[in-house]
Image (cartoon, helix red, strand yellow):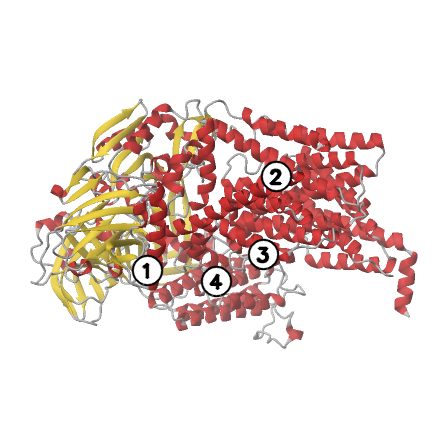
Amino acid sequence: MILKLLFSVLRQNKSGALTAIGLILTGDIFSPQTQSDLIILIILGLYVFFIKVFNLKSKVTFLFCFFILGLLLIEFIFTGVSEHSEKASVWLFLFIATGILQELVPNNK
Amino acid sequence: MKNHKLAIFIGIILFIVPFFWLKPGEMNLGGDSGRLYFYDPYSFLKNYTLYNFIASGKGVESIGYVFSSYTFVLFLLKFIFKSPTMLIAIFNGLIVSTAFLSVYFIVRELLGIKEFSFKEKIINYSSILAGFFYIFSQELMNGGWANPIVSHNQLFLNPLIFLLLLKYLLTKNNVYAILALLISVIFATNFSYVGAPTFFSFYPLSLLFLFIYVRYIRRLSISYKSVVFGIFLFLLLHAFHLFPELSSVFLFSSAVSKTVFSVEGISSRGGLDYFIAIAASTKVTLSWMSLNQSQNNPWLAVYIVMPLVLLGGFYFNKGKTFLLSGIFFLIVLFLATANITDVGLSFYKLLFRIPGFSMFRNFHGQWVYVFTFFYTILFGQAVAIVASRLGRRSTFIFLGSFFVFILLFSISFLNGSIPIPTYKDSGLRYAFRMDPMYEKVLDFYKTDPIDGKTISFPFTGPGYQILQGLNGGVYQGLPIVSYVAGKGDFAGYGSLNPYDNIFLEYMKEQDFGAIKKLFSIMNIKYVFYNSDPFIYSDVFTGYLYAHVSEYAPKSQEEYKSFVESLPVGNRIDFGDKYHVYSVNTDTFLPHIFTTSDVVYTNDQLSFTTNPYFNDSARTVSVSMDDPINKDSAVLYGSTQTFLSMLTNNSHLHRHAPFISHALDDMFYGFVPLKEKFDLYRLKDDPMAYFDRSMLHLSKRIFEMQKFGETAMPIIKKTWKQPELWEIYRLNSYNSWEASISRYQSGTEDLIDLVGKSSDSIVIQEANRIKINEQLFRHQIELVRFIRNMNRKKEEKEYIYSITNKMFEGLFQKVNIPIYNPSEYYYDLPDYPGEYTVFLGTNETIQNIGDANISINNKKLRPLQKTPDNNLKYNLLQFDNYSFKPYADTNIVLNIPAKNLAKDTRWENSGSAIGSEQLLTFDVNNNIGENTKGLMLDIPEWQPNTSYLISFDYLTDGDDFVFSFYDKKETADVLRQYVSNLVFEKILNSKTWKVHQSIVNSEGESLNAFLQITAFSQKNISRMHMKNLSITKIKYPTVLFKKIPNDLHIDSQPPQITFTKINPSKYLVHVTGAKNPYGLVFLGSFNNNWKIIDSRIEDKTIIGSTFRFIGSIGRSIVGLFIKDDIKQNKIVATYFNGDVQEGTHKNIFLAPSTFESWGKHMVAEDKHSKTLEYANAWIIDPEDMQGRSEYTLIIEMYNNNNFYIFGFISVFTFISLLVYSIKKRISKHEKNN
């Protein structure tokens, strides 16, 4: 019952949820903390969960990749190769991998 | 063909471009591979590739067969084009144009399928763009072009072989597969053991890609039978190098095998450690942008367009080929960068557990070609996908912009600035025109009839030769004389191993007598001296002469005088820069000779360089493991002291721990578990286990210092380590009591572990000293921290008391040994007999008359009158001693130690106190710890020496700090010297205690001093000290020379005449061999060197088989080549005609090549290492069936494998070639 409610609230706020993912990614890339696998796992898990919930297509994932690439570019221009650009690069890798998997494993829902 | 016109035109242009990189006559040679095969392929072929023993330095086994096909092709091309410049340009052109065209055709093939249905123009331009992207990629342009080695050929081989296999799998046309196989033979280095990283990085992944693509995307069948047959053909074609290499890999004593299978590869410098070191500096960002890892300019941000196009491709893609390419791209991106998450890095580290994976330790350099290849095919497809979504004009702009962009960034490559760079910092250009004068030097060595070696000065560190070209360019690479003239050249100090460091010392001391001895035993016939000031100028000293320059003459003028003081006579000048000196005839030892005496010793190096025991050049030593001559033996006492384990002050090593979790962190509970797991993984490596435990203890101290002031509470009760099941106590680590308890139990466990270990007493004692020194260091760090921390006084007193109590207990438990500087411990090999005993004296020894040697409860004393000859060689002779079988071989040398502190005085704020008397030191602590205290300069301080500082002290429970400083010169103009704190220790005792410290002075250390300061919190504190002694510790040499029994007769060695047939085969004709004698071959020791008697057959099955194969070979070769039956002219005689040298040849193939096959090997069990590097055989008359005149063959026997497998490869190659031509002709006839 609670799950259903949660799902329904989430579905009504799809753009909000995806914006939150984008903001979290931005926050992580620009934060001074070193990249943590735990954070990656949580964010990526959340995104995979959203793929299921919102029935997201791979194109959305690749749009996120464009967004990450933009952050990478900003970092590279202002700081060169840095801890932040490296974080963006890893996120780019993971999101492209997710996008490819989405295309190869069709979402039946 | 019409569609490919543009691509082929570009291919032709690209082939021509490299012809403008080098000026006429120039060559870009040098580096690790030397690339001398471009300069003189014929000489390279006959001196290096056809044999498994090369004349570099003292000679070394090296499987160079793999270069033979490549060098042979170069030899043919050189025959046609003559100029090495042309040869280099042809190969560079081939690399660039073939790489471009191969990529073009691959991308065309991938884009041409139905799922894309692109327009022809888009396919064509995208494929051309992909070709440009590949060859002009920043990664590859700035990668291997500047210092190309043979593996650089993968730049074009990877796409070319990929294309041919793709075409074969799609069309089933055998011609593609055969072409791929034949090309692989020419460039065999990329498919061999030496090219294993290039092969295994590309082919497994590429073949998997092709398999999935053909089978599941194109849905075509694959003939597995053909694939297996193809692999079989590949093995036959490459048999000439693969099988000799494989036999080395599976020969477990070989260096190759150790590299592949050794567990050391998992953690050693050669494996994981190396990987970890470079992984930290590899950036994923740069790889995404297809930039080189050394590029970091902000304007290179424009390269963001590359991943942007890829993303465009992913966004608009609808086919599976692109996805498949994407998956492989991500895999190689991961492999080329390693830094994709911590889990990814840990996984990568695990891969190093796979035998052989350590070949990828330099992972980025090895995966970058594969990465760029998959990036390229993904890029080509992405460009086409994006372009197909654009309008006509936009497509034109889009593709045009990319062409301009890529070509713009490739200008420095196209004009030759990248492939043939001039380095900005040094101004050096490694492309040069060979000086004709130096070519005359090479001709001299090529035609010289004597089979001797040469030593080249100025001596370099890595063994490179430096040569200035005519146009100012430089050759910096392998010694040319070795690889082109076929004469062993010692160009760097490492090549003189095992005499490398000894030679440097002699060089520094200008000990020409000792150098003469080394010249003899290293078979040095010539000294080559390059007096060009440029090659010994500042631009090279930093790297090439860095270590050697500490010992070598400082300028060319000094070098010239050094060279002329060597045991050399006649000098030949080649122009004003190159000089070849002949080594004096009384110094030169021939390559092969018979011995006058063989001595049995456990230290060949010391024996060989000791003029007292070994004044005759023909007296050679053999190992103790080879009991050959039981009458002549010299035994060296091997030192038994923990001091040998404390070199470079390793006992004073300071660990630098890293903390990632605070003690109150919710995850801290897992830290002890992880530490336990780390130790568990090191359980089979005691040294690493010990070091890691010491690091963990340092971590405890660091935690207390980091969190003790504010975050750590005091619980005022005993703390107990949580058990595994006590999960609820996982956060109980955050208290002072917990940290102190953990430190205490960790140290106690380590002390127990050392005590119970199966290590020798010497290692146990060294480890106890290391623990003790770390305790001292931690104690003062912690006490100082506690005193200075900002907590309540009662809390500080409490923490201070429990800390002190802990250290007191630990110092008692560790209980280090007290070192007696007057006693020296040795062990000898168990070898019974009557011996004369000697002691090698040195400057640290005094009162030698009081010395004695204790052995088996017997005291040996020095002879009352030592012979003058012994004194000349600093040898003190003792009473003789008779060793009985299985007797105790431990010996103790007693010599009164010289106390350097004897006449010194402590200085105390202007006043001085004698150091030997009882010293009482009162301090008023009201003025603080920084009081200067007592200071004492150590007299006779020398660099690279061990010192023992010992004294008794009593502090009545007060703390004092005992410090040791050494003084070094600095580069700072304002401050010429700086005093470094080497160690400091808290001294505290209520009764008299002995303190000892051992310290090794560093190379740059100028002098040193001791300091004692007060550290007590009382207002007035007092310290007493007595019996201060400072002694240099240098173990003198103890030798036992066996007295020959009455039956020992020195026999006259036989006469021999030796002739070199080729680098791995010599003929030795022996006459007058009536007694046992030693035959010495001055080339690196190798078990594969065999002596063969061609008159006696080996009756074993293997022998018969080899004889049979040899007889076939002899018959076939005899049809084309006849044996050289010219009279063997004598070119030199030595030892009054005992040894004669015949005219040397270099015969690779003749009927006589097979004369040793399946024949009897002589004295195999009496083959041993002599002079610590060379080969010696003891030959008895019985070994030769009582004959006194015979001919022996000395041969690297495993070189025969090359003839067998080489024949298989050549036969398969010709058969395949004939088959392809025949098929082509029949197809042509059918079509007509």
Q: Nearer the viewer, mark 1 or mark 2?
A: 1
CA separation in Å, label 1 and label 2:
53 Å
Q: Is residue B786 above or below residue B9?
A: below
Question: Label 1 lies in what chain?
Answer: B
Res. B694 mark: 4
CA separation in Å, label 2 and label 3:
35 Å
Q: Nearer the viewer, mark 3 or mark 4?
A: 3
Res. B139 mark: 2
Q: Quadrant of the C terminus of chain B?
A: top right
**Mark 1 on the same chain as mark 4:** yes
Number of residues whose C-alpha sits closer than 10 Å to that of mark 4, classed few (under 14), some (14–19) or many (20 or more): some
Q: Is residue B638 visible?
A: yes
**Mark 1 on the same chain as mark 3:** yes
Q: Earlier in the sequence, mark 2 or mark 3?
A: 2
Q: Is residue B456 above or below residue B705?
A: above
What is the quadrant of residue B598 in the picture?
Answer: bottom left
CA separation in Å, label 1 and label 3:
33 Å
Q: How many marks?
A: 4
In the rendering, at what x and y percent does residue B789 appear?
A: 57, 58
Task: Name the residue carrying label 1.
Answer: B1103
- The residue closer to the viewer here, B1005 or B548, is B548
Q: Is residue B842 above or below residue B1040?
A: above
Q: Is residue B898 visible?
A: no
Q: Earlier in the sequence, mark 1 or mark 4?
A: 4
Task: Name the residue carrying label 3.
Answer: B228
At 58% from the left and 50% from the top, the residue drawn is B201
Number of residues whose C-alpha sits closer than 10 Å to that of mark 2, classed few (under 14), some (14–19) or many (20 or more): many
Number of residues whose C-alpha sits closer than 10 Å to that of mark 3, classed few (under 14), some (14–19) or many (20 or more): few
Q: Secondary structure at mark 2?
A: helix
